Image (cartoon, rainbow, N blue to C red):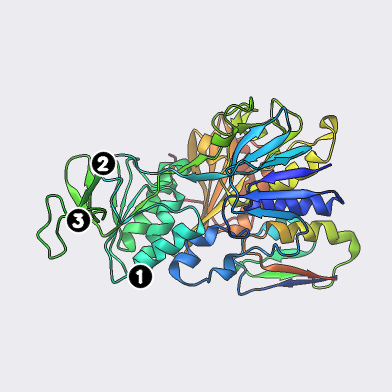
Amino acid sequence: MKVHVDMNLCQAHGECVFAAPDVFELHDDDSLTWVEEVGEDRRAEVEQAVQVCPMMAIKLEG
Amino acid sequence: MRIVVVGASLAGLRAAQALRAAGHADEVVVIGDEARAPYTRPPLSKELLAGAHTVEQCDFPSDEVDVSWRLGAAAAGLDRAAREVVLADGERVAYDRLIVATGCRARTWNGPGAELDGLHTLRDLDDALKLRAALTDGTPRVAVVGAGFVGAEVASTARRLGLDVTLVDVAPHPLLPLGPLLGGRCADMHREEGVTVKLATGVQGFRGRGAAGTGGAADRVPAAGEHDRVAAVVLADGSEVAADVVVVALGAIPNTEWLAGSGLTLDPGLVCDATLTSLDDPDVLGAGDVVSWPHPLAAGETIRVEHWTNAAEQGAAAARNALAPPAERTPYAAAPYFWSDQYDVKIQAVGLPGRAERVELVEQSPEGDRLVAVGVRDGRVVAAIAFNAVRRLAWYRRQLADPPRVDELREAVAADSRSLGMPPAEVVS
């Protein structure tokens, strides 16, 4: 599955990093990077990240 | 098994989604008093109020959630003997398991001047749209009564709209749960932005234009059936703050009146055990702002949390537990997370700052614009609060899973190369 983050919405709450630390990473300047293609074994934690993002900025495809 | 969720905001929505995600195929009914589909509330005091977000940008994607939505239908009672929710129009909705997610409403002003036009509270989308209309009708003078999170955010938004803003609170500093050190910084921030901040200042009431008029052309006695408009906030010492728009931000009250007489324990939140199951009935669970439940960071005492993330996570947790027999339900014990955006500062916190005996600064950038403080109770860390330091907060959040002593935490921070830096020695409060 593919992970999309709308960086126009992201406000660096860091909730996704807490939910899925192997997929999302916050950097020193509060910018976010993430793994765009994620295996099925990570689905539960990425879905959790989608649910707890206060900005509704994360979408899953596939 | 038919599951009824009462409350169609964040907690109710996440409960409905979690029921389907867990494979529950039977009927799910979500009852909500607002006619509108679920929407997110944090922007109501910030982006929506500022005009930066549209109403549609606040909508949750809820169309694809395959449940029976009963919107515009307020729950008026609960008949546990019959296992039915009674709606305001008398209709009864039967359940096998019930999730109570009715949230809170804004506390209103009931003292002198409560009937005046121009007084606002802010809780739902209609409130926000009315307030936005008032703030953008000319250049009104704005008074915000109550410097909690909603009040401070509204003051910030109104000030950034270019308006004259006065922020009043009977407390000695804004954001009471964060303590005097950070609350004082918040007050300084508002003052630097040009807000008139009046602390330790009580309010007697509100005066209308018709009574003891200020002499302006708008002063007149209102006609029959027409409400007078607010002209001023009357402070405890009798002095006044002239205002065209008043925002009353005095906190929130759990919506549990509909449960009176149901036999469920109310405090006034719905009192639940660690698994979000009501004390009195294993078929009734709760989620979100309405729930009082025992939390390990509070040494097992009950707390109620009025924040976005708690509602989202509890909705899902209550749903999973609703599907399980009572003996297999799991506790909800996450450290609460919340944030507040004021001007260019993002305040973020984890844990229970309101239970701290004191708040200590533990890291601060050399420029002083980024910091982390911890709330301490009985020598242990019960909360961490960051100003513009989200990346650091994640580390503190992990520590709260097993709360360290504050001296241990300080040693760990001193040894951590990612620390923002040592704060100056001033600062314990």
Q: Residue at x 77, y 43 (%)?
A: B3
Q: Nearer the viewer, residue A7 or B242?
A: B242
The chain to which mark 1 is attached is B
Name the element at disc 3: loop
Which numbered mark, 2 or 1, is in the foreground of this view? 2
Under circle 2, the secondary element is: loop
Q: Nearer the viewer, residue B398 or B237?
A: B237
Q: Is residue B235 left or right of residue B88?
A: left
Could you tell me which residue is drawn at 52 percent across and 62 percent down? B43
Q: Is residue B346 in view?
A: no
Q: Amino acid at mark 3?
A: Pro
Location of mark 1 (residue): B136
Between label 3 and label 1, give the one nearer the viewer: 3
Q: Earlier in the sequence, mark 3 or mark 1?
A: 1
Alpha-carbon distance for marks 2 and 1?
A: 26 Å
Q: Residue at x 43, y 57 (%)?
A: B153
Residue at the image position 16 percent from the left and 54 percent from the top:
B210
The residue tagged 2 is B112
> Is tag 3's residue or tag 2's residue first in the polypeptide sequence?
2
Where disc 1 sits, the SS reads loop
Q: Provide residue B2's location: percent of width, then percent of height.
A: 80, 43
Residue that carries the numbered disc 3 in the rendered image:
B222
Q: CA distance from mark 3 to mark 1?
A: 24 Å
Labelled pair 3, 2 in contact (Cβ < 8 Å): no
Farthest residue toward the left?
B215
Quadrant into which the C terminus of chain B falls: top left
* Mark 3 residue crowding within 10 angstroms, few (<14) / some (14–19) / many (20+): some
Same chain assignment for discs 3 and 1: yes
Mark 3 to mark 2 CA distance (whole Å): 17 Å
